[in-house]
Image: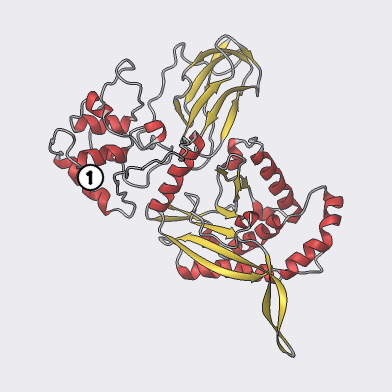
């Protein structure tokens, strides 16, 4: 018999940690390979983690509600064969470069690189709040006691104190008016000069009336909120708009949709047809299929299209079509229908919402003609697809201009102006429109 660690699998490019929401087995239980053993939650998806081995669960290394770093052991299983581990595995201290509020790695230089690695000792009997190693280190450097740390209002998940919270507290001089150390002052000054500085504004008091309803944000809504605010702080957003005449595309779909479903067993919607044009445009303008790493621009070699989808709860999730450039229209249709269907049922796997390189959001589903979408970090661009509406339009013919009823739609392209200028962002969305307008009405299925 051998004891083997079960580690937290990779859950996506930007996901660095996961929260255990519930254990599905108990210590001493016999489990089979691929049997779900724990439920987890990230800022992207809720999911189950299956066991990679068969055996007996010997030890849980984390309790419900605790955060586990990607690649970190969270359980020990005893197997017939397997890699041997220590009898008493030790928890790995979470990486101090992981933001405790949403698992995203801050693009700013971490304060931990500037100050010594120390920590504030807060036992479970003293506090029920979680403090990241970085927050503890800053508190120690600034002589903030455990009791004083308890008084700091946290803006992170479940009221957790983030790096920004404690730096803002220090900058205000702390409760006792103590002076901030020179070293920390220099870090704060550097932080202010970065392109991603965050201004902590005091929250205005909300006046309630007798008819107001108070609804507490669920965990997923809190994570979405944090991710959206982070994106706006990270990327200077610019949005370009283009109107496209998609009459040919509409006519072709109406002509072949029944035959398409009979042949392939899949309903043909507009979404895969639009994604097909987006993929072709990305091939011609790869600069929008990128990420930013400090002063480096990373042009992605793969084209993985994320498609924003609304859940029945009203929350948002972005399943990803991997290697979309290698799929034909049938492949895209099958992927869109499958991912959208399982998203509504909450059946997506972590890998299916990870590693997107470009995102589309079909706001036309809700009858919206255009929108200004927020970039899905760490990507640099996102395209909103408006509703297709019949409208009178001027058509140029050999006999002169005429007014005709056409199927029109707006495309709204938001992009990160740090690396995507107006020329690239505008030419890309114009190319998508051109491809849609040139759709072949005689195209075979």
Left or right: 334 as drawn, with respect to 112: right
Where is the C terminus found, in terms of image quarters? Answer: bottom right
Percent x, y of residue 369: 60, 62
Left or right: 200 as drawn, with respect to 297: left
Left or right: 25 as drawn, with respect to 135: right
Residue 56 visible in rendering: yes
Q: Quadrant of residue 344?
A: top right
Residue reaching furthest bottom? 399
Residue pointed to by mark 1: 187
The coloring applied to the image is secondary structure
Residue reaching furthest front? 210
Q: Is residue 256 above or below residue 181?
A: below
Percent x, y of residue 299: 50, 56
Q: Residue at x 62, y 20 (%)?
A: 53
Q: Is residue 230 above or below residue 248?
A: above
Report the front residue among 416 and 386. Answer: 386
Q: Residue at x 18, y 29 (%)?
A: 143
Q: Residue at x 23, y 24 (%)?
A: 147
Q: Residue at x 43, y 50 (%)?
A: 231
Q: Secondary structure at mark 1?
A: helix
Q: Is residue 190 above or below residue 273?
A: above
Percent x, y of residue 336: 69, 49
Q: Quadrant of residue 26?
A: top right
Percent x, y of residue 365: 65, 54
């Amino acid at each position: 018999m051998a004891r083997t660690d079960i580690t937290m699998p990779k859950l996506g490019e930007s996901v660095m940690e996961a929260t255990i929401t519930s254990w599905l087995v108990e210590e001493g239980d016999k489990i089979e390979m691929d049997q779900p053993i724990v439920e987890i939650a990230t800022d992207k998806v809720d999911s189950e983690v299956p066991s990679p081995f068969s055996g007996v669960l010997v030890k849980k290394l984390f309790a419900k509600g605790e955060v586990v770093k990607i690649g970190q052991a969270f359980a020990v299983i005893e197997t017939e064969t397997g890699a041997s581990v220590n009898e008493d595995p030790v928890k790995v201290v979470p990486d101090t470069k992981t933001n405790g509020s949403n698992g995203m790695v801050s693009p700013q230089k971490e304060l931990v690189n500037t100050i010594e690695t120390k920590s504030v000792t807060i036992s479970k009997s003293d506090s029920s709040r979680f403090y990241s190693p970085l927050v503890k280190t800053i508190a120690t450097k600034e002589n903030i006691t455990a009791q004083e740390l308890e008084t700091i209002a946290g803006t992170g998940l479940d009221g957790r104190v983030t790096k920004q919270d404690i730096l803002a507290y220090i900058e205000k001089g702390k409760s006792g008016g103590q002076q901030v150390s020179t070293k920390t002052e220099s870090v704060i000054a550097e932080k202010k000069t970065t392109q991603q500085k965050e201004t902590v504004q005091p929250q205005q008091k909300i006046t309630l009336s007798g008819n107001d309803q108070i609804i507490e944000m669920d965990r997923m809504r809190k994570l979405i909120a944090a991710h959206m605010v982070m994106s706006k702080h990270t990327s200077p957003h610019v949005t370009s708009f283009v109107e496209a005449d998609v009459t040919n595309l509409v006519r072709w779909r109406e002509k072949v949709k029944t035959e398409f479903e009979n042949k392939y067993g899949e309903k043909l919607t507009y979404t895969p047809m639009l994604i097909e044009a987006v993929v072709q445009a990305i091939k011609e303008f790869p600069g929008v299929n990128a990420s930013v790493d400090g002063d480096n621009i990373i042009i992605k070699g793969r084209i993985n299209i994320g498609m924003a989808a609304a859940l029945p709860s009203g929350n948002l999730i972005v399943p990803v079509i991997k290697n979309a450039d290698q799929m034909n229209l049938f492949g895209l249709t099958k992927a869109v229908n499958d991912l959208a269907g399982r998203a509504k049922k909450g059946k997506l796997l972590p890998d299916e919402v990870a590693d997107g390189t470009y995102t589309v959001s079909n706001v036309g589903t809700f009858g919206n003609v255009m929108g200004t979408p927020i970039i899905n970090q760490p990507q640099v661009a996102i395209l909103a697809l408006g509703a297709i509406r019949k409208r009178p339009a001027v058509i140029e013919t050999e006999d002169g201009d005429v007014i005709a009823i056409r199927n029109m739609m707006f495309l709204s392209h938001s992009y990160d102006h740090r690396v995507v200028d107006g020329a690239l962002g505008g030419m890309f969305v114009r190319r998508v429109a051109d491809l849609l307008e040139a759709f072949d009405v005689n195209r075979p299925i």
